[in-house]
Image (cartoon, coloured by chain):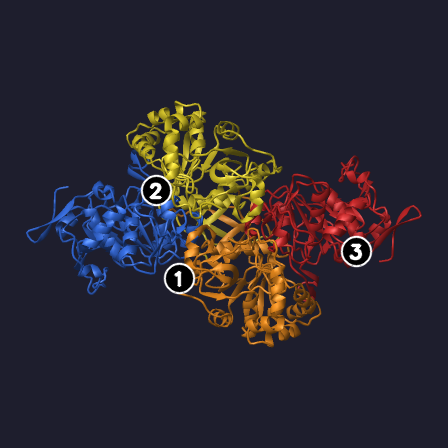
Chain colours: A red, B blue, C yellow, D orange
Amino acid sequence: MTSKTGSLAPLLPADGPWKTAPKATSFAEREFQVSITTRLIEDQKNYWVAAGGGPMYSVLLARRLYAPNALYVTEDGIVGADPVLPLDPVMTVVAEKPSYRALQWTTMNGIGDHCAVGYMDVGILNALQIDPYGNINSTWVGEYPTKGRRVNGPGGADTIAAQCRRVILMTDHQKRKFVPAVDFISSPGFLDGSPGARERAGLPRGTGPWVVVTNWALFDFEEKTHRMRLRGIAPFVTVDRVLAEMSFEPLVADTLENLDVPTEQEVNIFRAEMDTGGQYSDARGGWVVREENRWKLAAA
Amino acid sequence: MTSKTGSLAPLLPADGPWKTAPKATSFAEREFQVSITTRLIEDQKNYWVAAGGGPMYSVLLARRLYAPNALYVTEDGIVGADPVLPLDPVMTVVAEKPSYRALQWTTMNGIGDHCAVGYMDVGILNALQIDPYGNINSTWVGEYPTKGRRVNGPGGADTIAAQCRRVILMTDHQKRKFVPAVDFISSPGFLDGSPGARERAGLPRGTGPWVVVTNWALFDFEEKTHRMRLRGIAPFVTVDRVLAEMSFEPLVADTLENLDVPTEQEVNIFRAEMDTGGQYSDARGGWVVREENRWKLAAA
Amino acid sequence: MATSERYLRILDEGRGDYLKVDPDGFRDRVGTKNRAMTPKLMTAAEAVSRFVADGDYITWECNYLQRGPSTLLREIVRQKKRRLWACGKFTWVAVAFLVEAGCVDRADMGFFMGGPGLSRAVLEGRLKIWEYSNVVMTNRVRAGAMGLSFVQIRSLGGTTNFPHSAAKLIEDPYTGEPTVIVPALNPDVALIHVHQADIYGNARIFGAGISDVDSAMASKKVVISTEQIIDTEDIRHNPGLTKIPFYAVDAVVHQPFGAYPGECPGHYASDSEHVGEVFTAMNRDKLGAYLQKWVGAYESDEEMLEKGVGRARLAELERRSTRKEGFRP
Amino acid sequence: MATSERYLRILDEGRGDYLKVDPDGFRDRVGTKNRAMTPKLMTAAEAVSRFVADGDYITWECNYLQRGPSTLLREIVRQKKRRLWACGKFTWVAVAFLVEAGCVDRADMGFFMGGPGLSRAVLEGRLKIWEYSNVVMTNRVRAGAMGLSFVQIRSLGGTTNFPHSAAKLIEDPYTGEPTVIVPALNPDVALIHVHQADIYGNARIFGAGISDVDSAMASKKVVISTEQIIDTEDIRHNPGLTKIPFYAVDAVVHQPFGAYPGECPGHYASDSEHVGEVFTAMNRDKLGAYLQKWVGAYESDEEMLEKGVGRARLAELERRSTRKEGFRP
């Protein structure tokens, strides 16, 4: 189903410095995903990022390259740190290195309050399972609570998803992740998608998911129906393949943005200062290489 | 009206060290009032005291003489200070001297929370106007809000009166202060005196005024009716005079406690370290002297 | 969502006017605030001119005697701001002189002294007061800083404050017992005097206090005056000392002796003579003369401190600050 | 008091069980706590034995990886406490191993990892979970520390957490809009690891954190473990650093490396090998073996640190703590 989208403003700035920068010669799919998210991060905005993984890597990379004054906070109440990199993947809060040179140290309720009154412009979250309205499941896979398996719970994501003005969702591009209805709404998207659904549930007005970034594609949500809409794809996949790896059919914009592959600088910094052990990139997804003048996805 | 009180436990310990200590040769009525309040203060309890005047003087004197481990807090959130004496009468909060050597500095909500959950055992308050049920007016004298004059408002007293387990009220012994009904309930006593009246108004259970200390007398509140009851008088006044200077008739206990006059040590420390300019003692009330083997109230 | 037939009874309601409760509107306003680390240094005159508007609901932290934003309060008098609604939590004399100056015509009461002038203003209808307490007001502000529209409190019930407030007595949704709730408060503007701040507004406060942090986070506009400007590097060396983050702050006024005649612990003692003078003026209905002498006669507080108080006196007040433990980083 | 005919509609209600809300009962319990400055030093074994009872609702601050009371959590396993109800806010692996050890049979969820063992416990009915989020749980605790029975929140609504929680969606009493409230939480016992405390329990914590202070003030019993014991004189020299006052504290356990294998910022880094081991054990359903190796095999944490970890390794972890700015007074 194609949506008559007409002249949508591009999600990614058309004149971003990555446009003209030398491209990486090869990269992991997850590096591509981090690069796209990185480019969506704006200077002089406040970000509440999930403590670890793609969300935190993206904001760290953005601060190094494109948005030095993008401020980020974590759910333990660290405000505006200038962390010592690389961070141990599980030591991203409370500890010395992520706390370093912050502007303020507060608490979970402290930062929750800053978010509740509207100081957190954008949230960046991981999604284990996501539906067409951007609802996220991170609680239970299967039939709650009698069949399947327990996962980690919303953590701080429910608050981020409820209260940040915009939310960037990151997820791996897999059929089992994009589902028609999540098994459990851990953190709210547009709920049933109807107008005012979030407000009727008590959530602050003017909030909600903004985009979904995967290792293959970029989505936003159509204004009226609140349904997920494909907005851009990677040069190493086709629209058909993107859609085939989803268990529901998203809207598709008339014109899709071509998502630029990571620049040399992006992957160099990412590998040297963030994902130093390749632990994040290697965990899921494959490798992309340039062959015969085209970007090709190597077997995972 | 005499109340059949039978064997009431004395309000003041019968074996207090002031019993045998040398008495002051003369003293101000307000010094007497502070001495009585001082002796009511127990070691190893937490006190929230009105920031200044008799309440604070009493807890400071008690800590010097009888209850070194009575901890007090003020509404700016100073916990357990060891203040630099004397304090300027209006500089009893936030400032250096009252803050000195505290165990903790917090805020008004901080200390309000400590009180709300029950850590403040006893409150000590000044009352501008008081009724038979211990309700206090500090907002308006006259017919609210059209005739009369505006006064200071409850300040922190409403919280102290609502939430401390016990409250000690201090007021000058004057007809216009003890009124059948206060012009405005700024801080709650037993409200209309009926059983459960405080709980029906949303106040925590097991709280309420405990005693009223004046420059002449000591009152408590009868358990069932919650009416003020005379429990002790100063040796320099008669029961008749005490009752004559009240605009309502309190209950009177069968046996009245004889309230001991200030000791030499009490007034010496009070004058040297607390009310150094005599500003507090001189503001209201007269002087008491020993004449012909009796304590006599000199003309004010 | 299942529609339920369940209800909570409202047992009683105060009839007092209150600042409209609109947490989403507050969020929208916060959304327009500058997130950049832009220098916000300006004079008291500029800060008050830009960020205090006629008709604003105004709160200030601490008071005219103790680490309050005294310079900013005097500047409001100087600029003849009008129709302000004052958050009267633990404010000693400031409400009285703001009423005398014609700046304030409404107040929520916690604690403020009056004297004959204030009583007259009430009786003549020039000042409307609604009745709370200090701690209830700081709870209302905290609820505002939490992004809420109301909060439960365990006081105020049964008093005469209640009918003259915006409190409600409701059935507790979990215990069924009667309990009191009050509306959250998001003032238009907060004035806060601090010990140290950088030029962006990251601010440190030492010692006990009233509700500095909550007032900053609950208010639409935040003006800070500070004894000292420090480098942002210094802030980053000890983030645990930061009480207010820059993104809440609109103006930073470098104002040594900004709490005069009050004490700023760690820096200077109060000027007890001046404090006596303002109390006497209030009690004898001479606040107009007091304001003329100390505000109207000077172009700025700098001039007042220089010519009216004098350097020798200021140095003396600094010498009297002798118990600095805990009031410096 | 006028009886009003007004009501607030309850629009929806979660059906989750929750710890009974009883703010007055909590006040009564607080009333029985010792107000004296009595030394409260004791071993972890004694503190857990005296202050953690079977059936308690238990909360702990931070977690097994970051400045959490790891020694106290291991001692709970060692003493085979039973039927505990866990406050699962941001706890990584601890809920999983407490369930594996048979200590915990109920949990309020914010964030905790599971692995196959935890899923099996849920499916077999050995573990009952109710659904919140980290920040909702810390808000419930804060409401408990404020003496309330409930608090409004601006999240949770619309999620599947809601029906499995004790939240209610009500008409906002001031705006009329739908809004969510949750019950306050007063845990039976809180375990908190701090940087410094005196022997009475006046405690300092440096750095960011979860809800240390609120947990202390909201809980009936409070056990603190501390890296360092300092003199009360030291506390009095800088009262602004005190986060928890002694009167809330029941036990002070002097436990250097009490957060091991987690990091205690300013003191030591985490033992990443050990952290890897516990994650692997959890993911491979081998938490029983992990607990036998690190808890069951030793009489105490002192013995475990001495023999199981070794002094050289501990010294190495101390050396790895190199960014101490702000983590020491």
Q: Which residue is mark 1?
A: D28
User: Which residue in the protein does label 2 denote?
Assistant: B91
Q: Is residue D158 visible?
A: no
User: In the picture, residue C296 is in which quadrant?
Assistant: top left
Residue type at numbered disc 3: Gln
**Mark 1 Cα within 10 Å, few/some/many (few <14, many 20+)?**
some
Q: Nearer the viewer, residue D283 or C166?
A: D283
Q: Which residue is mark 3?
A: A174
Q: Quadrant of the N terminus of chain B?
A: bottom left
Note whether C265 is above or below D237 in the view shown.
above
Q: Are marks 1 and 3 on the same chain?
A: no
Q: CA distance from mark 2 to mark 3?
A: 67 Å
> How far across and how far down the image is residue C286, in percent?
31, 27
Give me the chain letter of mark 2. Answer: B
Say which amino acid is labelled 1: Asp
Residue C268 image offset from top left, x and y in percent: 40, 38
Please state the chain letter of the residue tagged with numbered disc 3 in the rendered image.
Answer: A
Residue A283 in the figure: left or right of residue C19: right
Which residue is at 52% across, 47% downward?
Answer: C241
> What x and y, as percent, mark residue C234?
56, 43
Q: Residues within 10 Å of mark 3 (few under 14, many from 20)?
A: some
On screen, residue C107 versus residue B276, left or right, reads: right
